[in-house]
């Protein structure tokens, strides 16, 4: 069975069982697989159509990915760390470990996420500096010169 056929079967199951029942079942599956369900999924489950559409999209991206699931979780952990989301970082760290990531791999990903996050802060701030501070608008309005060094 290919991915599209599997997706179509999933849609048929949603229609036959109903959104609330599917959302509840999928939440239980997530808790079994990962040990817990993220808070965002719990809130989405209050509106099953939101949870189901989100998980259908997420599943389609993951299932058709050329990237090994362990690396998908490590990437997700790195993004969570770079965005400074402790809940995302913790959840995806746990998921990566369940998918076979080693302690060393997790630590390496944390270092890489920190490096990228740091570079992002610097690149953004330097661009703003170049755009805004090459001429200081508040200073120009007060007649103050900013000396170049």
Image (cartoon, grey):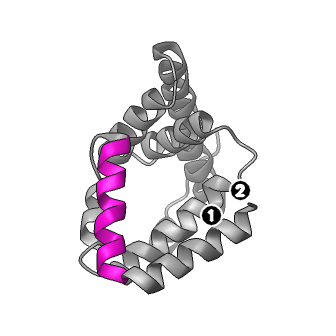
* Image spot of residue 144 (x, y percent): 49, 62
Near mark 2 (Cα within 10 A), the count class, few <14, some 14-19 or many ≥20, is few
What whole-number distance in Å separates the C-alpha atoms at marks 2 and 1?
6 Å
Which element type, helix, strand or loop, lies under badge 1?
helix
Query: Are the residues flagged by discs 2 and 1 in contact, CB closer than 8 Å?
Result: yes
Q: Position of residue 87 (x, y in %)?
A: 30, 46
Residue at x 71%, y 63% (from the top left corner): 3
The residue labelled by disc 1 is: 60
Q: Judging from the image, what secondary structure is the residue with disc 2 in?
A: loop
Residue located at (50% from left, 17% from top): 102
- Vertical relation: 124 (above or below) 55: above
* Residue at the top extreme of this rendering: 104
Residue 137 position within the rendered picture, expressed as x and y whole percent measured from the top left: 53, 70
Residue 31, above or below 55:
above
Image position of 3 with respect to 81: above or below: below
Place residue 74 in its image quadrant: top right
Q: Which quadrant of the figure contains the C terminus?
A: top right
- For mark 2, what is the residue? 64
Q: Is residue 1 above or below residue 7?
A: above
In the image, the segment drawn in magenta is: 18-33
Question: Quick check: can you spot residue 120?
Answer: yes
Q: Residue at x 62, y 63 (%)?
A: 60
Nearer the observer, 74 or 18: 18
Residue 72 within the magenta-colored segment of the rendering: no
Q: Nearer the viewer, residue 74 or 143?
A: 74
> Residue 109 location in percent, x, y?
54, 27
Quadrant location of the N terminus in the rendered image: bottom right
């Amino acid at each position: 069975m290919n991915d599209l056929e599997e997706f179509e079967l999933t849609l048929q199951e949603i229609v036959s069982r109903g959104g609330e029942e599917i959302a509840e079942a999928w939440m239980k599956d997530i808790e079994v697989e990962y040990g817990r369900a993220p808070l965002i999924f719990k809130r989405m489950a209050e509106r099953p159509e939101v949870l189901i559409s989100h998980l259908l999209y997420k599943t389609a991206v993951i299932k058709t990915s050329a990237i090994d699931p362990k690396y998908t979780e490590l990437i997700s952990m790195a993004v969570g760390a770079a965005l400074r989301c402790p809940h995302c970082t913790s959840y995806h760290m746990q998921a990566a470990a369940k998918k076979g990531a080693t302690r060393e791999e997790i630590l390496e990903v944390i270092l890489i996420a920190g490096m990228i996050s740091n570079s992002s802060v610097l690149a953004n701030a330097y661009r703003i500096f170049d755009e805004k501070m090459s001429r200081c608008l508040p200073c120009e309005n007060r007649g103050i010169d900013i000396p170049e060094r």
